[in-house]
Image: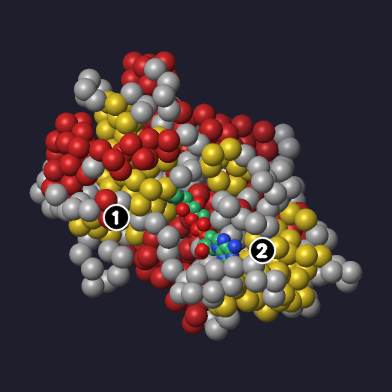
Amino acid sequence: MRAKTVAIAGCGPAGLAAALLLQRDGHRVTIYERFEAAGPVGSGLMIQPTGLAVLRELGLAEEILAAGARIDRLFGRSVPSERIVLDVRYAALGDGAGHGIGIHRAALFNALHAAAVAAQIPIITGRSVASAEPTAAGARMLIFADGEPAGPFDLVVDALGTSSPLAPPTGRALAYGAFWASLDWVEGAGFDKAALEQRYVRANRMVGILPIGRPSPTDAPKATFFWSLRTDQLDAWRQAGLASWKAEVLKLWPATAPFLDQVTAPEQLTFARYAHRTLPQPAQPGLIHLGDAWHSTSPQLGQGANMALLDAYALAKALRESADLAIAPARAVALRQRHVRLYQGMSALFTPVYQSDSQALPLLRDRIAGPLSRIPPAPWILAAMVSGLIGWPLRSLGLNAQAPPDLGPALAAGTRDRPLIVFDGDCVMCSAQAQFVMRNDRARRFNLTTAQGPLGQELYRRLGLPTEDFETMLLVENGRVQSHSDAAIGIAAGLGWPWRAALVAKLIPRALRDRLYRLIARNRYRWFGRRETCWRPTPDVADRIL
Ligand SMILES: Cc1cc2nc3c(=O)[nH]c(=O)nc-3n(C[C@H](O)[C@H](O)[C@H](O)COP(=O)(O)OP(=O)(O)OC[C@H]3O[C@@H](n4cnc5c(N)ncnc54)[C@H](O)[C@@H]3O)c2cc1C
């Protein structure tokens, strides 16, 4: 593969992640940023399991986890009724559910920026990008605001955010924005340090507190405080003064007093405006738009930075798969398109429920949607939605929401080409299933081993699972482990048609599927019997038994 010359315009999460991934793949990358000193803009944000999967690939997950605050729950009450209208717990996703991370933008920026500096990626600051002009040879020149050019580049990556001058104007400004401030976290004030908490008056007032960990290791833990406001009320807000605003917030949520006490000047609050926009054509010859430059919206679902990271990963993957620049950018867009459409759609749907002048929507939210959200499968759907996992965005990128277990080199290599099924060799039902797999695995895809054998024992030990009372079979493929109902479905899918039809079971929330799996697993000896001797393979399949 010939290394490409790549200009990354913008030093935000999308630009930095794309630069790191492309440089790692051998491309010659230069970042251009308008500010003299590249730095983070704004207060805190939430990293979701999707964004963390990309940060893990960049080797930055540990640093981000250590800097941020673990968020297990998103919780909101309507005022004055005190009705719970938002209660999303990541744990609703069942075994192996991820969690959010509240993080100061500076901590996220510092981790990505330091990695870019360590990788010796040139970061040219004080350069305001104005356009990316195509050349006769099919490359692109970057043109700066002062008219100076740079290039030519095989590829320009537009990571300039929502007001990118490289993207045609599209979308609409949203009526509501919000004030944001980073304040010291107050211990013992009655706030959950693992939750984003919010209070709403209808949909036209919203106050929230998000723990965000430490901007740098020497700082005290912080929280992001936010207050929703119509953009056309900004002047009136300024004229009314800080004292009047504080009185309003206190009336709405008295417990915020120790946070409000820290706000002594309006300059501590930064007003953020939101726009909802999605580019119809995010890839053109020699140019691709990533992150907010491609799609931006209100931060109600907390996905923007995570989607920017996923976009960057998709571009690197597409360029790895095809060095042809007539193909790779379009392929990167195809890898992300469905997820982007889904989340832009959901965001457009949900934003007015929390930020609008509507009377009807908050009424529906408080009286109907709030109570319904606690009835299964709604908790699972909501948890998947805030995790960023609706539409399976990781699968097409070959990423995992959970850190891959350390299986050791032998097991990782041994399961690369042929998935390995690990089953309970003492259990009559499990042995019958193993024989069924052997009979129907016409492509001879799977290897098998028993949980009681040396390989099985090592696997259960490495995964921290009981090594005598096996609660689940395992499917290990390319170092990735599936258990419970996911393993059963994965095996059926691997057998080809008609067994592949079992994939429709994935439409059932995993928590429900696994409940049924566990019921059968707990009673398997009682219902189906136990073998006196451990299962032995017949000679025709012996080569597939490890
Ligand atoms: C208040 C608020 C809260 C948010 N909360 C969340 C959250 O909880 N979770 C989440 O995932 N997302 C959240 N987001 C969204 C998230 O911040 C963005 O989606 C994310 O920053 C997009 O990253 P990006 O790299 O595409 O763009 P940006 O972060 O906007 O980076 C763009 C970069 O380009 C530079 N630049 C811009 N124009 C030029 C130019 N002409 N020339 C050179 N450089 C230029 C900028 O200085 C900047 O460094 C929130 C956003 C806001 C405003």
Q: Which mark is residue 531?
A: none
Image: 244 above or below 307: above
380 on left or right of 395: left
Residue 470: give x, y in percent of width and height: 38, 48
Q: Identify the residue position indicated by label 2 in the image.
A: 130
Secondary structure at numbered mark 2? strand
Residue 479: tell me if it is visible. no
Q: Is residue 376 above or below residue 301?
A: above
* Visible residue check, residue 269: yes
Whether tag 2 and tag 1 are in contact, CB under 8 A, the answer is no
Q: Nearer the viewer, residue 69 or 6?
A: 6
The residue labelled by disc 1 is 267
Question: Which residue reaches farthest left?
Answer: 188
Residue positioned 20% across, 57% down in the render: 184
Q: Quadrant of the C terminus?
A: bottom right
- The extreme right residue here reads 136
Residue kind at label 1, given as amino acid type: Glu
Residue displayed at 37% across by 40% down: 234
In this view, 299 is above or below 138: above
